[in-house]
Structures are given as C-alpha cells and as structure tokens.
Image (cartoon, grey):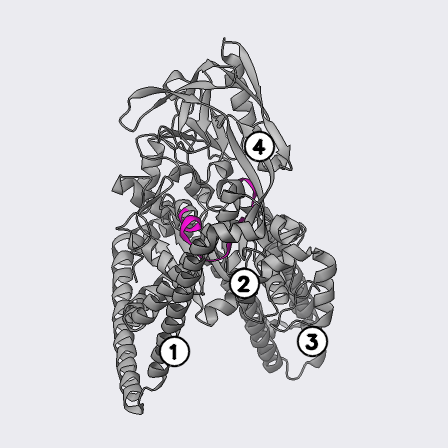
Amino acid sequence: MENENIPLELEGLRLDADNKEFNKAIDCILNTDKTIYLTGKAGTGKTTFLKYLKKVTHKRMVVLAPTGVAAINASGETIHSFFHIRPSVYIPEDPLRTADSELNELSMKSIFKHLKYSKSKVELIRNLEAIAIDEVSMVRCDIMDVIDKILRLYRDSTKPFGGVQMILVGDAYQLPPIVKKEEQEILKSSYDGIFFFDSKVMEQIINNNQLIYVELQKVYRQNDSKFIELLDRVRVNDMQDKDFALFDSKINKDKFTNENKSHIILTTTNVKVNYINEKRLAALPTQSKVYNAVVTGTFAEKERPTDIALELKVGAQIIFIRNDKENRYYNGKLGVVKHLGEKFLLIETETNNGEKIDVTVHPETWKSVSYKWNKTENVIEEEILGTFMQLPVRLAWAITVHKSQGMSFDRVMADLGNSFETGQVYVALSRCRSLEGLLLSSKIKPQSIIADPRVIEFSKNMSEYYAAEDVMLINQTEKIDEKAKLYSEIIELKKYIKELEYFKSQQVELYGYDTVSSLRRKNRIKENEYQDEIARLNVKNRELKEKIKKLENKESEKTAAELKKEAAAEKARQKQEAAAEKARKKQEEENMRKEIESNLRPRLEKEIENRLRPQLTKKIEEEISREYEKKLEFAIIEARCELRNEIDQYYKEDVELKDRHIDLLNSMVKRRDEQITSMKEKESEAKGKINVVQETAHHEEIQQGISKQETILQEKSTVSDKDSRKKIVSFFKRIFGKNR
C-alpha cells in the first residue's frame, strides 16, 4: 500500500518517490507491528529515513542510539540513558534477565531494584508503540536482551520486546559494537557472537518469522558506478588484485602538502587526530580566537558535538556539523575560515559545481532530550534536559573514522595503516563522494579489510530469504489492501479528532480564563459544532471498525476447497522453488569449477612449485632414510638366522667349538649393534652425513674380528680340515661384508 497522503517534502527532508525500499519500509512501519530491520550500504539514506519517519509517524515512538553523538545526530536519547542500564555485561543467567519468556519473581524484584524507574517512566514504557534504534550495528547482543526483558516486565507481556514494534536501522558491515577483551570472553559463554542479531530475542523473532527485512539499494552519496562496485567489494571483503592495484595508485604519503590541504584526513585514533589538528592550527600565522559554548541544564561531555572552547584562526580548515536549512552546507562539508566575527564566522566553501562561496555561520543549539509520557494528552513528549549552543563547526584537518560515520566528504585522505576493527576501512573509504577525491597515506593491506563472518552469514541469509518472501508479500498485499485502507482511514479520523479537540482547547487561551459561564456563552455555538463533528466522526469510526470485522469474518469463512487449492498451489510453488534452487546450486558448482580451472589451478600449481615442493621433497627423503634403516635391520636379523643355521649344520659333533664360536659371534653381533646405534645417532646429528673415518675404523674392527676367528680355527682344526676352515672364513666374510 502506498502512502499517498504523506508529503514528499517535510521540513527540509525529502522523500524519494521512486525509492521502492524506502516506501516499503514506511508502509511496514505504519501498517504492521512487526520488528523491522532497515539496512543498506553507506550513503543509502538510512539516517534521513529515520528523521523523516519521526516527522510522519502517528505511532507513539522514541528514537534511541548506542552512543551520545549518534543520539544527538538522530535527535534522540541514548539506550543506556532511556532504560537506566548500567555499563556492564549481561548474560542470560544474570538475575536481570532469564532465558525463558516467563518472568519469575526473583527476576522482577532484581529489575525493580536495579532500575528504580519513576512513575512517569513506567507510564511512558507502558504506552510505547514503537522504538527506533539508529546505528544498531554498534549495539551489543546482551543489551538487546536487556531491553527485551525490561519491556516484557513493565508491559506485562511475554511477546518479544513486550509487544513494542522495534525499528532497527543500521549496516552490520560498518562499525561493530565496542567490546573489551574481558567482556568478549564473558559473552562467548552464552552467545554465538557480539552483534544485535546474536541476541536471544532476535533469534526468537527471526525463527518465528516476525522480522521484516528491508535493504535500501539506491546510493545517494556516490554517482560513479565503478566506485560503488569497488566499495561493495570492500564491504564484504571480496577484493580482487586489480582493486589493490587501484588503491596503490592512490597512495600519497605526505599528508601536509599544499596539494592535499583541502583533503580531510580520516584516521583510526584520537591521538593522531589531535596531533594533526594542533600542528596545522599552530602553523597558521594568523591570530587565534576562542569561542565559548553556552551550556544549560545537563549536557554530557561525551555528547558535545564540538569543543566547549572552540579555538579558530583565519585559514583554519573546518567541517560543518549541522545541515543548513538553505542548503548552503551540510553535515560533513569542509570549509576554510575567512573571518572571525564576535559571534559569527565567515566560511569559504564550495558548491556542488565547484564554485567558491562565502557563508555566514551563526551559533546553533543542540538538545539533550529525554522522553516522558503526557497522560493528559495521551502522547509521548520530549523533555529537554539541557542545551549546547556553539558554532556548528569543528577543526577538520583530521577526524576519526568513528566520528565520520554518517558524514559525506568531497575529498578524503585515508590513513588506515593501523586499521584494527571490522568495517573500519569500508566506513573510511565510503565517506568520500568520488574516487577522484580519494587519497591514501599508506598501502592498504588485505588483512586490514575485515568483514566479520557472522555478519556475512546473517546478511546473506536475510537477503536470500526475503528476496523469495517479496513475491509472497505482493500477493498478500492485494488481499489485505482493503483492510489496510480502512485502518488508514481510522488513523486519519483519530488524528482529525485530536486536532478538533486541540483547537477547542485553544479557545481558553483565545478568550482568557475569565469565568466558566462566560466562556460557555461565548463559545456555545462553536462548542456544539465541535461536539457534533466529533460525534459524527466517532460514528464513522465505529462503522469502519464494523467493516473490518466483517472482512475478518469473511476471511475466516474460507471453504475447505479453497484451502486445499491454496495448499496445492503452495506445494507446487515450493517444488518449483526447490527445482530452481537445485539448478542454481548446479550452476554455482559449474561456475566454481570453471573458476578453479581458469584462476585457482595455475595459482595452486605455482604455490606447490614455490613452497610445497621443497617440503614434499624433504619428507620423501626422510621416508627413504627411514625405509633404508628398516631394511638394514631386517638384513641383520636374516644374517643372524642364516649364520646360526650353517653353524649348527657344520658343528654337529664338536659342541665345544660350536659354543665358543657362537659366543664369539654373539659378542661380535652385539658390538655391531652398538656401533650401528652410535652411527645412527651421529648420522642424525650431522643431518645424514656419514663420518668416513668412523666407517673405516668400524671396517678394520670387523677385519680384526675375522682374523681372530681365523686364528681360533687354526688352533682347533687339523691340516685335513683346511678346506672346511676356508669355507667358514669365506662364510663370515660374505655375511659381514654384505651387511657392512
């Protein structure tokens, strides 16, 4: 259903009528109560969408954010401030929250004691209809579960988030939650990851098909399709060699040349930012002037958009931190100070056409807000806790990547050599409007581009599921269109009734609080008109509700044949989808095979040649060496057996000679074994190099053993046994010579 009554432009915020995803998200929020995850690449208008939604929604809604700066930018409140959550780590076993949907007594008492909500805060939570969270990628999983538990408890509901519609806005591929090492270890025990979608409540919502996923596709920040495609690859860590080559061509190591002075430096730490800005400001020859901010009420230091004592000089490079109603500048646009007035600045900046213009800038006011429930008017109101009035600029030769999130720049010098977080490189590069305006101070290494596997898996699953779901939504929209229109009319009627009641109440201010009777006399006719109009509208309201009830009854009276027909159609659709999925997977496998053949195989062969082949050769040599040693041992064993058999056969009668020879043989074999063991140890220490001297000595010992054996044989044998003795000597030579 299209929002025909919603204006395309509202207080400087313009709705793109051709953006289907934008309109779909508005429809889903206004006409359903499901949780919505609105995501999109950098520059697709997520923050603009949230600001627009805040202006047009009829729902009782609050806007929250994980950090003070994000909350100020979104004109909302921080999550921790709104819910009074202490900075800590919460796990399912903690008394603050139980894993099941039921709320036990211990948990309730713990939360009441922990949070200490005022009566007005409780009323506010009970009357909430929607909560929008900006920069949801920076919200931890346990914080999501704490929010869920609080809302369930105070709204007395077992539904996720107590039945409050959650509007989650952000890009999980950008900056992740800030988690300390010790906190990460604690979270690991209960969660699969640290992201908002890893929370128990989000798992429940996704599994029960209660999440609406909308991904904004149209990029407004960049116009160059090649640059957009490059950023897409950086976003999911799918870089190619040509991409790194392109980045290398953008390297310009000197950050301080005149050529680069108009580029804003994006770096990873506050230390670097402060050093660069202070160095550049001190180098200017002009005199400095300090502008002091005016702070009222409570305005936390970490929420301040710029310095409370802002030191500037003529020639200083600044960044605007507020959008101009006349569209002369925007949040993130660079400029140079030309004149320091008493309470204003004259800034030189450029138009979109490159034309230089001078802009007069006056102080702006930021509000630190809290939400409260107005019981009389039955609406949620913003309570201003404090204000911060200062010139809407900040020194901007350099800023951190974190503070740049949500901004756009014409020229960027990215200093990403020490990038350490997932999404950090992507956020920095995507701040630039064009590839021509991008410079790098150092080489971007592949390991610096980090995309969390959990984010990739979640985003892929959501995209694939809801791509198929969109087809079903078209058919469902046609069926519920009439009912939705009736609901829309009721909403408009309620708004009109409120307006009439409001105008009626204004009569008090118009005529003054003189007397009740006098007031009635003055306004009797108008009061009657108001009452008649309100009564007529209430009757119409009841009629519309009756129509809706009839429609619902009509829908519930579907015949069995219709249901059977729908089931058959659904089965056929599922079968068709399964076949299409099978064909898709087959095609993916074929594409992968071709990819391997064309690209991966040559790379693998080269890798094997350069790195693996030497390792394999070494292993083969080691295996051959071990095999040789085994064969040597087997040969020795065989030699022993053969020798003993021949001795037994030869010395059948002379037992004494046989025993002596056997003892001699055993001693020689024992010595031989010891020498082999010694040789192995020395061979291992010298990496296979055999000591020739040791081998020669060993050979001489064997020869001496053989000579000694000959002497023994000569003493015991007769001249007639000469041939037999030669035979034994020959045998010993053959055995020991062969296995040496």
Magenta stretch?
A: 52-69
Q: CA distance from mark 4 to mark 1?
A: 51 Å
Q: Where does the N terminus fall, quadrant-wise?
A: bottom left
Q: CA distance from mark 2 to mark 4?
A: 85 Å
Could you say whether the residue bearing mark 4 is in a helix, strand or loop?
Answer: strand
Return the x and y of residue 144 as percentages of the image width and height.
57, 58
Q: Is residue 137 above or below residue 111?
A: above
Q: Is residue 710 left or right of residue 428?
A: right
Toward which corner of the image does residue 187 lie, by quadrant?
Answer: bottom right
Q: Is residue 205 above or below residue 699?
A: below
Return the x and y of residue 380 as percentages of the image width and height.
54, 53
First along the sequence among labels 4 and 1: 4
> The disc labelled 1 sits on which kind of residue?
Lys
First along the sequence among labels 4 and 3: 4
Q: CA distance from mark 4 to mark 3?
A: 115 Å
Q: CA distance from mark 3 to mark 1?
A: 120 Å
Residue 549: which disc? Answer: 1
Could you say whether the residue bearing mark 1 is in a helix, strand or loop?
Answer: helix
First along the sequence among labels 2 and 4: 4
Residue that appears at 57% across and 17% down: 290
> The disc labelled 3 sits on which kind of residue?
Leu
Answer yes or no: is residue 561 visible: yes
Do callouts 2 and 4 mark residues in contact (Cβ within 8 Å)?
no
First along the sequence among labels 3 and 1: 1
Q: CA distance from mark 2 to mark 1?
A: 92 Å
> The disc labelled 4 sits on which kind of residue?
Phe
141 vs 391, nearest the viewer: 391
